[in-house]
Amino acid sequence: MYLKDPIVFNTNGGNRFLFSPFRKQFILCHPVVQCLFELHQKDADILQFLDKIKQVGYLDVKDFGRFSQDEVSYHYRKFRFLLSNGYFKPMPLPKMNGRLNPLKIDDNLKHIRQIILEVTEDCNLSCIYCSYSKFYINEPRSNASLSFTAARKMISWVLHQRENDTNQELIISFYGGEPLKNYALIRRVVQFVDKSNKYGIHVKYNMTSNGTLVKKYFSFLEQYGFSVTISLDGDRYANSFRVFRETGKQVYDAVLKNILYIRNTNPEYYEKNISFLAVLHKRNSSEEVHRFFKDEFGKIPTLTDVSTINLRPGKRSKFFQTFIDSRKPRISSMSEAKDMMTFHPEIKGLSDMLEHTLAFFYRSYLQLASGKASLHIPRAIIPTATCSPFNIRMFLTVDGRILPCEHISRSYWIGRLTSGQPEMNIRKIANSFNSYLEKISPLCSKCYISDACKECMFNIHLKEQPPRCDYFIDKKTWPAFLAWRMSILERDPTIYPKIMRKGNDK
């Protein structure tokens, strides 16, 4: 069984912390306590060490100076207190032998919350960092579109699956390409749902759009209450990686004009239904993006890093040179980071870390009542953060492939929409997922954040032998992982109670 050991680490501000995975607590660590802790880890004779200190009368600690025998004795008593209370006890890493049950997948289908339709592969933009650009390994894209017949069959099937679950809303999402390039299909789908929803399921519509066509079809979006997330990376320069496919001209002015039109035409709709997604790269920063959206639109965008998944091996160097500046600080303004909270990837990462390392972090009163302290007991869990198929959504591609979501490679399809009903073998899906989980388990079993993993197994190097994960944390990298996040709190401790009050928003 692999163990997670207690560790001492230094933050960017020069503070030294002891983290106890068994007690799930961080405490400030005096250099003498660290010295005694390291001796304890090596099974050295601490009493013999203290006798030598007594003879000499002091202890020299590199980079910290000299401590008297009385100081050493005081911190030895503190060390004994920590030792007797389990601070130096390692915690077994969770057993990674959890697997998917076909019955769970079948139940997911009966309560599915979202269906995503890839209405077209066509897009009027050619964003340089797009996951379908030359930098990525992906299937070639065309101008193919989803047929209304396919969309109708898929929606009818999902509505039938949900006939006994009418309380929870169903979200129908339209995906591209640029989804509004196939507005005709979207309109037909919405009209079909209006007429055929005999079960009385509350249906909501949303899409992510590049914003170039939202003005043209605004009356329709407004009529049916669409939630629209517009992709925009900030001001004109920050958005300069996003260009029109035919002309190569920047898209910023066209999108800005459309956003202002919506805000001026229907401010209430704008406030309630329009949100923004910004990609972080070399030409912007989280603080610049935050200020831009706050000043221009009165909104806080969701931030995401430019994707480094499925990069072509021969293009990796050029990709990082073009899009990523490793010298740029992740957070330069704590006030703006606090305002963004979990919209900011670093604050989200800090919140995730606190949730899974502290014994007193609760996201709900229900979690408090259930006794979170039991989390230190070894549990059998499913490796990675891979969603159980259809637990949240299902994704239908233009060519009829069915996937668990829109973010993974099309090669991992788990069903097909044929001339009849959707064809999905639940047991085969479970076996397929479990074979992948079996493959990744040995690596996850050694990872220090295996019980707090946020990565989907389909977004790591699953096909390599053995599989490789860019987010793997072991004993060697664990101190830096904690120091990176604790340094954020160190810069502004007031963010801690704000996270605790807000919880770990998803």
Image (spheres, rainbow, N blue to C red):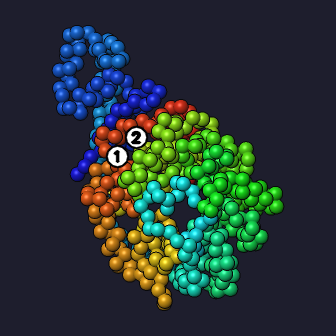
- Residue 304 or residue 169, whichever sits in front: 304
In the image, residue 425 lies at what x, y percent? 38, 81
Identify the residue at horizontal 23%, vertical 51% (top origin). 1
Q: Secondary structure at mark 1?
A: loop
Hey, what amino acid is under mark 2?
Answer: Phe
Furthest toward the top, the residue is 56
**Residue to which mark 1 is pinned:** 473
Identify the residue at horizontal 39%, vertical 70% (top origin). 412
The span from disc 1 to disc 2 (Cα, nearest Å) is 8 Å
Hey, what amino acid is under mark 1?
Answer: Ile
- Residue 3 or residue 50, whichever sits in front: 3
- Residue 267 or residue 279, whichever sits in front: 279
In which quarter of the view is residue 143 placed?
bottom right
Q: Secondary structure at mark 2?
A: helix
**Residue to which mark 2 is pinned:** 481
In the image, residue 18 lies at what x, y percent? 37, 33
In which quarter of the view is residue 389 placed?
bottom left
In the image, residue 90 lies at what x, y percent? 28, 42
Task: Reply above or below: 457 against 319.
Answer: below
Furthest toward the front, the residue is 247
Q: Is residue 454 visible?
A: no
**Mark 1 Cα-neighbour bin, 10 Å: few <14, some 14–19, many ≥20:** some
Does residue 223 appear left or right of residue 106 in this picture? right
Identify the residue at horizontal 32%, vertical 66% (top origin). 436
Identify the residue at horizontal 20%, vertical 32% (top origin). 42
Q: Are marks 1 and 2 in contact (CB under 8 Å)?
A: yes
In the image, residue 449 lies at what x, y percent? 37, 49
Does residue 125 appear left or right of residue 388 in this picture? right
Task: Reply above or below: 334 against 14.
Answer: below
Which quarter shows the C terminus? Answer: bottom right
- Residue 267 or residue 164, whichever sits in front: 267
